[in-house]
Image (tube, rainbow, N blue to C red):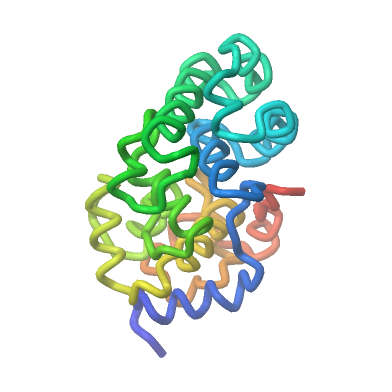
């Protein structure tokens, strides 16, 4: 059996447990994914997915979003929280896309992080899922689970991104992040992980921190999109 924390073995177990893992933000274009990812900060994918259809119907292009009344965007995205700052970020990034990138979302990390409200995490989400460019997305779930698995000993996003990236080949980065995020949302919760029903329990060095009873643990499993 693989040693506790073995990266390849854990990824294999997550691959088997979550064969349908993917980005849980709904989008049809790089712009829609960029907007949805900005809106998802300190919110849930489900809440974002509830507001973006109306937003994208009203403002389907970067040009339309760049010229949109701020108050109208604020009203459309109000349920996701921090709607004023997020609305300002959306109009700002749309204007930059129109002015500097001919209305098209840039496809490099260096260009994406120049947009208002876009950091490395958001940029890697867009690159990996809209453009097929490998990247590690150090969101809260990846940071938490990478520490529990013993892959890292830091909660700093840049350090986690670099360290986790060094453990896996680049062509695995995007799907690894999806699988870890799915596991974090469904099973390996921040406050009460469902260790007794965990598909990577035998490989996890932190397997004793959560609910051990298999039946009680199974009751903790959550399906975010249900």
In the rendered image, the residue lying farthest to the right is 226
Image quarter (top left, top right, bottom left or bottom right) of the N terminus: bottom left
Residue 29, horizontal then vertical, whole percent: 60, 49
Q: Nearer the viewer, residue 40 or 191?
A: 40
Q: Nearer the viewer, residue 215 or 175?
A: 175
- Asked if residue 173 shows in the view, the reply is yes
Left or right of residue 178: residue 203: left
In the rendered image, the residue lying farthest to the top is 71
Left or right of residue 83: residue 164: left
- In the rendered view, tell whether residue 46 sits above or below residue 158: above
Q: Residue at x 54, y 48 (%)?
A: 30
- In the rendered view, tell whether residue 222 sits above or below residue 203: above
* Picture mark count: 0
- Asked if residue 144 shows in the view, the reply is no
In the rendered image, the residue lying farthest to the bottom is 1
Residue 191, horizontal then vertical, whole percent: 49, 43
- In the rendered view, tell whether residue 209 sits above or below residue 167: above
Residue 193, horizontal then vertical, whole percent: 53, 53
Q: Residue at x 57, y 72 (%)?
A: 199
Within the image, what quadrant is residue 44 found in?
top right
Q: Residue at x 40, y 67 (%)?
A: 173
Q: Residue at x 50, y 67 (%)?
A: 175
Q: Nearer the viewer, residue 6 or 207?
A: 6
Residue 201, horizontal then vertical, whole percent: 50, 71
């Amino acid at each position: 059996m693989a040693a506790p924390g073995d990266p390849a073995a854990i990824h294999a177990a997550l691959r088997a447990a979550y064969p349908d893992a993917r980005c849980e933000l709904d989008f049809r274009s790089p712009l829609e994914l960029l907007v949805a990812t900005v809106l998802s900060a300190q919110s849930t994918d489900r809440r974002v997915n509830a507001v973006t259809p109306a937003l994208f119907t009203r403002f389907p292009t970067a040009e339309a979003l760049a010229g949109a009344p701020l108050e109208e965007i604020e009203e459309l995205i109000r349920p996701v929280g921090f709607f004023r700052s997020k609305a300002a970020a959306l109009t700002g990034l749309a204007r930059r896309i129109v002015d500097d990138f001919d209305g098209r979302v840039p496809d490099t990390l260096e260009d994406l992080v120049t947009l208002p409200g876009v950091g490395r995490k958001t940029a890697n989400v867009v690159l990996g899922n809209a453009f097929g460019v490998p990247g590690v997305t150090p969101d809260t779930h990846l940071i938490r689970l990478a520490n529990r698995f013993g892959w890292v000993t830091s909660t700093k996003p840049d350090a986690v991104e670099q360290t986790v990236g060094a453990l896996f080949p680049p062509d695995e980065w995007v799907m690894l992040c999806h699988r870890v995020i799915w596991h974090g949302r469904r099973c390996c919760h921040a406050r009460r992980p469902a260790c007794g029903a965990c598909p990577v329990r035998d490989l996890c060095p932190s397997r004793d921190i959560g609910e051990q009873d298999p039946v009680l643990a199974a009751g903790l499993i959550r399906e975010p999109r249900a």
